[in-house]
Image (tube, rainbow, N blue to C red):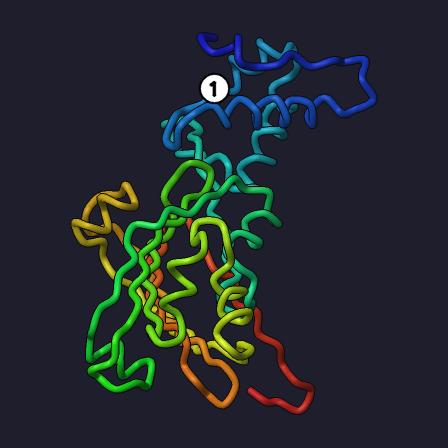
């Protein structure tokens, strides 16, 4: 087997079940591979680990169930990348905190920060169409791959000095708003749609043009229903997923 140097042998004298050792060895092995790469067939893995084929099949099946491998009939078993479960629908956790809790390596890059006028976004922020707006464009990167494009709009009179004086690649924008903009965030209205990646989107997210993206439009409010932040977030469809949890009351009927 060509890649056996990257695989770790199992210890049959260990109290850890052999299939579990194989699973861990394969997990570390496929982390060095790219999505779409094919792993060695069961027959080769069985010889390498010096175990029966069903034991190897059990380990591989576990990784398939976890979404890390994909068997294709007549072709073999291929590496898949796990999608990042985002909690943006129902939590105010910052991107940095959310990714840290998942144990993912992440960073944010500020691509643009400027003052603009725009009637459409002024209406979203419930300010006069002639008023200045701060436009912030950022790129979120997870495990070395671009994941989300963030286009964010805020009233200049509230946010201009704050945005220019702070590190928007490290600091939480929500914390900055609550600390310096004169109020607590009370709620956020979020709308989910989909779109195809434009030429600019594809360059930033490193995907093919017209690849599917998940789009979140969100308006965040301070007390007294004051809009302070409008954002358009474009998530790579092949790297992100969103969990919806519905709770049914006892009295509710279908």
Nearer to the camera, 44 or 131:
131
Q: Residue 98, image x and y in percent?
A: 56, 54
Q: Residue 96, image x and y in percent?
A: 53, 52
Q: Residue 32, image x and y in percent?
A: 47, 23
Q: Residue 254, image x and y in percent?
A: 55, 86
At a point 53% along the width and 76% down the height, the residue shown is 185
At a point 74% along the width and 13% down the height, the residue shown is 11
Task: State whether residue 75 is above or below residue 231.
Answer: above
At a point 50% along the width and 65% down the height, the residue shown is 176
Judging by the rendered image, the residue that carries numbered circle 1 is: 41
Left or right, residue 196 beside residue 147: left
Name which quarter of the figure residue 227 lies in: bottom left
Q: Secondary structure at mark 1?
A: loop
Task: State whether residue 192 is above or below residue 74.
Answer: below
At a point 33% along the width and 65% down the height, the residue shown is 232
Task: State whether residue 239 is above or below residue 127.
Answer: above
């Amino acid at each position: 087997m060509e890649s056996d140097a990257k695989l770790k042998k199992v210890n049959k004298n260990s109290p850890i079940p052999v299939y579990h050792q194989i699973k861990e060895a394969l997990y570390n092995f496929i982390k060095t591979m790219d999505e779409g790469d094919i792993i060695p067939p069961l027959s080769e893995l069985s010889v390498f680990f010096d175990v029966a084929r069903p034991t190897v099949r059990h380990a591989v099946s576990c990784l398939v169930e976890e979404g890390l491998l994909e068997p294709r009939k007549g072709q073999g078993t291929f590496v898949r990348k796990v999608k990042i479960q985002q909690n943006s629908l129902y939590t105010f956790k910052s991107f940095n905190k959310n990714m840290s809790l998942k144990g993912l390596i992440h960073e944010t890059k500020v691509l643009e920060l400027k003052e603009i006028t725009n009637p459409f976004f002024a209406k979203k922020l419930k300010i006069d169409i002639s008023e200045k707006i701060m436009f912030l464009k950022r790129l979120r990167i997870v495990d070395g791959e671009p994941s989300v494009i963030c286009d964010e709009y805020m009233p200049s009179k509230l946010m201009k000095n704050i945005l220019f004086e702070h590190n928007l690649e490290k600091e939480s924008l929500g914390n900055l708003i609550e600390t310096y903009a004169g109020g607590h965030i009370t709620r956020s209205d979020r709308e989910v749609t989909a779109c195809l990646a434009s030429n600019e989107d594809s360059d930033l997210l490193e995907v093919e043009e017209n690849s599917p993206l998940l789009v979140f439009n969100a308006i965040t409010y301070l007390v007294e229903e004051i809009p302070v932040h409008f954002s358009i977030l474009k998530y790579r469809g092949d790297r992100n997923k969103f969990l919806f949890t519905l709770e049914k009351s006892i009295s509710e009927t279908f």
